[in-house]
Amino acid sequence: MNNININNKNNLPLYLQKYIIKILCSYINTKNKLVTMPNVQLYRIDEGIIKRLMMSLALVSKEWFKTLSNNLTVSIDFNYKENINISDDDKYSIIKIENVKTLKLHFDQRNNQIYEMIGGTEKREIPIKTVHKKLQKLNLLQQSTNTNNNNNNNNNNNNNNNNNNNNNNNNNNNNNNNKLFNRIIIRNLYFDFKLLQKFIKKLYKNNNNCLSIENLTIAELEINKDIGISDIIELKKFVKKVIRLTFEDPFSMDVVLEIFKTWSKSIQYFIIDGENPPNLLSKLTGLDSNGNRNGINYFSNQLKELNVCKMSITIQELIEILKSNKNLINLSFNFCFDSLIYFLSTKSEKLKDKSIKRCSCNSLFKFIDNQNQNQNQNQNQNQNQNQNQKNENDKFEKELIEFEKYWNELVLLFSNQKSLTFLEIGHDCIFNFKYSTMSWKEKKPFPENVDKRFSILISSIPNLNNIKFFSGTTTANIFFEIASRNQSITSIKPSAINNYCDPEKYSADLKRLCDNFSHIQECSLTILPDNSVLFYYNKNNSDNNDNDNNDNNNNNKNK
């Protein structure tokens, strides 16, 4: 977008040049509304690119400048001139105050101030009095424009009796109304719910006729145990869109449902970073206690990032999320690996290794055998133990068959996630917690069929670049399978618990992985719980870890 070729501009008719500029203005307006999360550095880089694009277009000719100025409708931090008739310099402001429909402000909640960036690096506060003053001017301009439009419409209706003319005049009036200032986007950093509430109320109190304050978009909303449903009801009077939603600490399910009922269609980033109510994801995806669809799926196709690594997820919940979201870029979740090993192992692997057992949790797959339940209720109390065992075995067989159906569906859904570039998978279980115990403790790899089938799932994601993986134990074989199946993957970063794996062998295997697959650009092994990096490889770094224990500390310092 930056490289504008102006040498041949005169070869195009002026109307076509203007048409192209209007398309570019639409692109610029869209980009200027974004509050890209969570990478602040990339956000500012994108902002600089758009600024340079605007300047490049504006400097081509007066006609290009005029067309650009008339069609840019987003102001960032009041970047327009207010008194455009006073001086020649002010006349050439690219953003015109009368064309502003959307205002984006940057709010540092830690320091309780509105600010702008100077030169891309320096923060400069915009005093709150200045903010109120500028909002009042925008609001007055909106009201006067609206009054003029209504007067013009009344005059036109009085002077024109022809239906076609009336329709045209109404259309013109609608176009003018579309140019009114009607939306504020707040990119709030260092979130504090009470400070945000106070700031919004103060804005409304000082500008109580400004409709845009009742049409706010906020970048981030964090929910913790101190926030009740009354706080959300009060906030939604003003806030119409929330881009990033984070749950911290214990929180109420009623609060969660109220949030998703209100803002689910605008949420692009969803992170759970604390304890959560039971069956949270089932309720949000519309699943009942048996894992069957029986309600509303609140996840919309707007979602770009889902991070639920502080809880376990069932395969049914993950399927419902992926069904409704095909634009995911980052996905982080936890399975119960004890159950996963059981379901993906073959019968012969189970017979050979008696430690392969189904975990007693339902945190991977929910299955209720209603038929067996009914049979058990009708059984005579004196029925022999062999019949009970047979019923139990039948239930396990049915469960395995049902799991196969869901697993195949999950593989298909992963293969359709064309935007997904980052995947993080870890172990979590409601009984065997993340860092405490896994039944699969031995210092040995997963069963061969588990490696194969799990790697098929991950490698089915067509444009996957980065993998972070925690299972508690040694899983290097999986990465050989994945790397051989998908060459778009450039970064693999596993972690394991020291007592449950052979760290030196794991490191040697990862080094061999990097040597054998040239598309792997970066690889590391983190040992938990102390988070020490035992192995690190970067293809562009000559100081890679060579698996010599004497050099481990030095390499960690140089990262």
Image (cartoon, grey):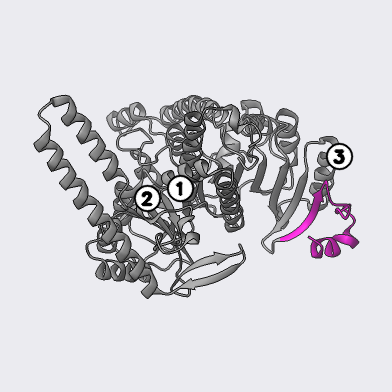
Task: Give the magenta part as a residue range.
Answer: 532-559
Q: In front here: 189 or 222?
A: 189
Q: Which mark is residue 212?
A: none
| Left or right side of 299 for 549 | right
Q: Residue at x 64, y 46 (%)?
A: 440
Q: Is residue 362 visible?
A: no
Amino acid found under the numbered disc labelled 3 = Asp
Q: State the CA–CA distance, disc 3 to disc 2.
A: 58 Å
Q: Which residue in the protein does label 3 denote?
A: 515
Q: Is residue 409 visible?
A: yes
Q: In front here: 42 or 342?
A: 42
Q: Which residue in the protein does label 1 denote?
A: 69
Q: State the CA–CA distance, disc 1 to disc 2.
A: 8 Å
Q: Quadrant of the C terminus?
A: bottom right
Callouts 1 and 2 close, C-beta under 8 Å: yes
Q: Which residue in the protein does label 2 denote?
A: 99
Q: In front here: 190 or 406?
A: 190
Q: Secondary structure at mark 3?
A: helix
Q: Residue at x 57, y 31 (%)?
A: 418
| Left or right side of 358 for 302 | left
Residue 148: % across, % down: 21, 50
Among numbered discs 3 and 2, the one appearing first in the sequence: 2
Please identify the quarter of the rendering in which residue 236 is found: bottom left
Please identify the quarter of the rendering in which residue 385 is found: top left
Question: Dot 1, how many residues are within 10 Å of its Cα: few (below 14), some (14-19), or many (20+)?
Answer: some
Amino acid found under the numbered disc labelled 1 = Ser
156 to 474, vertically: above or below: above
Q: Quadrant of the N terminus?
A: top right
